[in-house]
């Protein structure tokens, strides 16, 4: 069956156990979570979760319905036209060609954010496919650690 | 404002909600609440002998009365024992509020004595749950619990209260009404969809009513009867919908699914339109999905949007309370539907019914379970509530008992919980004391909550347990017969207690019967004495439940006969 990738935003009441309720729903029904980000919405008692998931049309439909069924869920937004960003933090040794690293970061909306005695830390924020390209390119500079965030998304 | 303890708030909330009975079992973490129960006699507390039974009893009470059932249990093992009850009620959409004690907040997460992550465990088997962190929140949470249990698609709500919260003093301002920003069930069906659905029925040639448990839960049975009578469209019932139509309704084809009648299953298989009122397309009903009702368009009415289109494609989805939807739908249907249109379809199904009726071979040498159930039906139909446990006896009861009204059958349909029947029947008896409470059970099932004989005797709740005893874990044995080449792995239950003495030792009455006369005498005696009873009925060891659609098979491929000589 054809699998589609979907970005879903869930607005929830910011209360005890709400995240485990949502992740439990995915785990208990065997749905897939690719990434998940969550943070409070400023000046409100709500939080916003952004979930990237994949599945057949029917599975996605069930995910939306089941999310809507949870009591603390205020709203489920299925994104169609959206801007997605992911963030990467990476540590690169000092002995690498740092000017090349910096140029690479700039190409992906990023920069060097810290310089320490063993290495530098770089940060980029870009679309998920471009993030993958960045990580691929960064491998040339022997990064010691690469940390990738989940997706945040906003409607166009 | 009144300043009272968390424990007192629990008791006061019960009074405000009009709770007349609580089933429960005390323990360390919930002692503060029990102390308040001791001081204030606002409701009756029934002490079961196991927490699982407390929740099943509250469940049976809720099913029989339509009210919300309430159970109190303590933390740790008290709560884990209650989980099967919660899951049972969740699967069948029964409104319950279950309150558990928890270790003090400061000790949560320390692996304290009798500590378990109760809300973590109950999350997937409740409609919603709460861990109360402050007594100030308690009035709102308790009100919300009762509101959530009963509204929308009903279900069990679990409230976990740490011991220090029940001791904490806080203001008690119990809300009269509750409005939740994030929870707004849809009650009214979309009028355009309703119109389209009625038009589809008017155009169909071979429509079938597919009646599900939602009818019972929403109290829509009367309207369904009216609809069926006006449209003269044949109907099938799921296990959970038994009693929606009277057993002798000419439109009723019987139960559908794995142990459904030939006519009911063929009607589903050949229909061009299913009018699905509150079922959830359980696999025990649909059989192989790709073959299920494959010529039919489907109308599905359900209050839970996630239930619609979950397993099969639905052409006319209607989200709403079944009763409210039918109030709109039935008058429209009466205008537009011509019952003559389905005449030839009714004829076909009638012939299917005559070709393969439900049948068994009666015997004078050995008691047949079907005969026993029919006999109870002849004597008590419409006068008794029938609970069941889970297994062959449950299916025979669903097939052969002449149900006359909704909620006459109380059974664990979705989860199939052995041990449900007897405690549920205790709750039923407490709820409708003027009626006789019969529990059909098996020799396997009854032993799973037999300790409740003590509860039934103590509180004078005379449930009559009819054990259809074949010395087997019968349903599993039946599957082993059909699908495992008769390798009867661990299903022989020949080793049994003396049920007569067992009943007597608890203060009830026991009977062991082997003939029709003995059965009649025992049942009459138990009814006239009004006592807690076990009637141990020795039945044919080798009787199978038929027809049967093998799991995953298609509905139209039924095993109709099987001769089993052991």
Image (tube, helix red, strand yellow):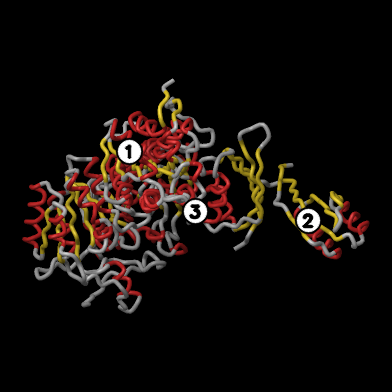
Name the residue located 17 percent from the left edge and 46 percent from the top edge: B436
CA–CA distance in space, label 3 to label 2? 35 Å
Q: Which residue is mark 3?
A: B310
Along the line of sight, which residue is nearer the eye, B53 or A72?
Answer: B53
Marks 1/3 same chain? yes
Instruction: Note whether B290 is above or below B428 in the view shown.
Output: below
Q: Which residue is mark 1?
A: B34
Q: Position of residue A73 (x, y in %)?
A: 56, 41
Q: Using the image, name the chain to which the residue with label 3 belongs.
A: B
Which of the two discs, 1 and 3, labels the residue nearer the N terminus? 1
What SS does tag 1 mark?
A: helix
Q: Quadrant of residue B68?
A: top left
Question: Where, quadrant-wise, is the C terminus of chain B in this rendering?
Answer: bottom left
**Would you name the residue on which mark 2 appears?**
A131
B299 left or right of B387 in image: right
- Mark nearest the camera among 1 and 2 is 1
Camera-nearest label, 1 or 3: 1
- The residue at 43%/44% (across/down) is B102
Say if mark 1 contacts mark 3, CB within 8 Å: no
Residue furthest to the top in view is: B1
Could you tell me which secondary element the residue under label 2 belongs to? helix
Q: Helix, strand or loop at disc 3?
A: loop
Q: Nearer the viewer, residue B398 or B476?
A: B476
Please give left or right for residue B441 compared with residue A151 in the image.
left
- Is A115 on the left-hand or right-hand side of B563? right
Res B76 visible: yes
| Labels 3 and 2 in the same subunit | no
């Amino acid at each position: 069956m054809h699998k589609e990738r979907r970005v879903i935003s869930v607005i929830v009441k910011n209360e005890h156990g709400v995240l485990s309720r949502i992740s439990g729903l995915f785990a208990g029904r065997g749905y897939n979570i690719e990434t998940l980000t969550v943070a409070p919405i400023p000046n409100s008692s709500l939080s916003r979760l952004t979930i990237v998931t994949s599945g057949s049309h029917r599975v996605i439909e069930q995910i939306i319905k089941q999310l809507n069924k949870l009591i603390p869920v205020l709203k489920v937004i299925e994104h169609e036209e959206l801007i997605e960003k992911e963030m990467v933090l990476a540590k690169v040794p000092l002995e690498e060609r740092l000017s090349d690293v910096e140029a690479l970061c700039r190409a992906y909306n990023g920069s060097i954010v810290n310089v320490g005695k063993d290495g530098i830390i770089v940060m980029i924020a870009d679309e998920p496919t471009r993030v993958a390209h960045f990580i691929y390119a960064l491998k040339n500079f022997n990064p010691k650690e690469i940390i990738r965030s989940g997706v945040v998304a906003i409607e166009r | 404002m009144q300043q009272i303890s968390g424990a007192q708030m629990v008791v006061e909330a019960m009074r405000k909600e009009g709770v007349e009975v609580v089933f429960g079992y005390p323990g360390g973490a919930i002692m503060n609440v029990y102390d308040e129960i001791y001081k204030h006699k606002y409701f009756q507390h029934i002490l079961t002998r196991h927490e699982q039974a407390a929740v099943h009893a509250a469940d049976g009470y809720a099913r029989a009365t339509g009210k919300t059932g309430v159970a109190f249990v303590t933390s740790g093992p008290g709560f884990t024992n209650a989980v099967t009850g919660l899951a049972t009620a969740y699967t069948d959409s029964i409104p319950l509020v279950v309150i558990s004690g928890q270790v003090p907040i400061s000790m949560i997460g320390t692996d304290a004595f009798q500590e378990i992550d109760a809300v973590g465990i109950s999350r997937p088997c409740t409609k919603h749950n709460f861990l109360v962190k402050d007594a100030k929140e308690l009035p709102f949470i308790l009100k919300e619990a009762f509101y959530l249990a009963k509204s929308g698609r009903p279900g069990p709500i679990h409230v976990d209260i740490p011991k220090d919260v029940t001791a904490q003093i806080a203001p008690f301002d119990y809300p009269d009404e509750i409005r939740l920003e994030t929870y707004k069930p849809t009650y009214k069906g979309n009028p355009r969809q309703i119109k389209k659905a009625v038009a589809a029925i008017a155009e169909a040639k071979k429509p079938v009513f597919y009646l599900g448990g939602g009818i019972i839960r929403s109290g829509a049975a009367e309207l369904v009867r009216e609809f069926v009578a006006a449209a003269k469209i044949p109907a099938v019932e799921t296990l959970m919908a038994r009693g929606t139509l009277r057993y002798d309704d000419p439109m009723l084809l019987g139960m559908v699914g794995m142990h459904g009648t030939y006519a009911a299953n063929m009607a589903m298989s050949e229909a061009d339109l299913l009018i699905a009122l509150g079922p959830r397309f359980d696999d025990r009903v649909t059989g192989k999905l790709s073959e299920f009702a494959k010529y039919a368009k489907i109308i599905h009415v359900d209050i839970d949007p996630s239930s619609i289109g979950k397993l099969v494609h639905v052409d006319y989805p209607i989200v709403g309370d079944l009763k409210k939807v039918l109030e709109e739908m039935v008058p429209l249907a009466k205008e537009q539907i011509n019952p003559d249109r389905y005449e030839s379809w009714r004829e076909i199904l009638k012939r299917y019914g005559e070709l393969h009726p439900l049948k068994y071979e009666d015997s004078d040498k050995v008691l047949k379970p079907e005969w026993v159930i029919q006999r109870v039906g002849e004597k008590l139909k419409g006068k008794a509530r029938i609970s069941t446990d889970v297994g062959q006896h449950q299916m025979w009861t669903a097939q052969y008992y002449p149900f006359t009204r909704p909620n006459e059958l109380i059974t664990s349909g979705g989860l199939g919980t052995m041990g449900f029947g007897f405690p549920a029947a205790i709750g039923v008896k407490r709820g409708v004391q003027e009626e006789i409470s019969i529990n059909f059970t098996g020799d396997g099932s009854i032993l799973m909550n037999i300790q409740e004989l003590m509860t039934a005797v103590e509180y004078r709740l005379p449930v009559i347990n009819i054990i259809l005893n074949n010395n087997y874990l019968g349903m599993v044995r039946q599957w082993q017969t059909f699908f495992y080449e008769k390798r009867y792995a661990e299903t022989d239950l020949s080793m049994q207690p003396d049920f007569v003495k067992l009943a007597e030792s608890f203060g009830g009455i026991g009977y062991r019967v082997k003939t029709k006369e003995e059965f009649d005498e025992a049942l009459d005696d138990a009814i006239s004495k009004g006592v807690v009873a076990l009637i141990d009925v020795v039945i044919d060891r080798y009787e199978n439940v038929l027809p049967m659609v093998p799991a995953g098979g298609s509905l139209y491929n039924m095993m109709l006969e099987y001769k089993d000589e052991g």
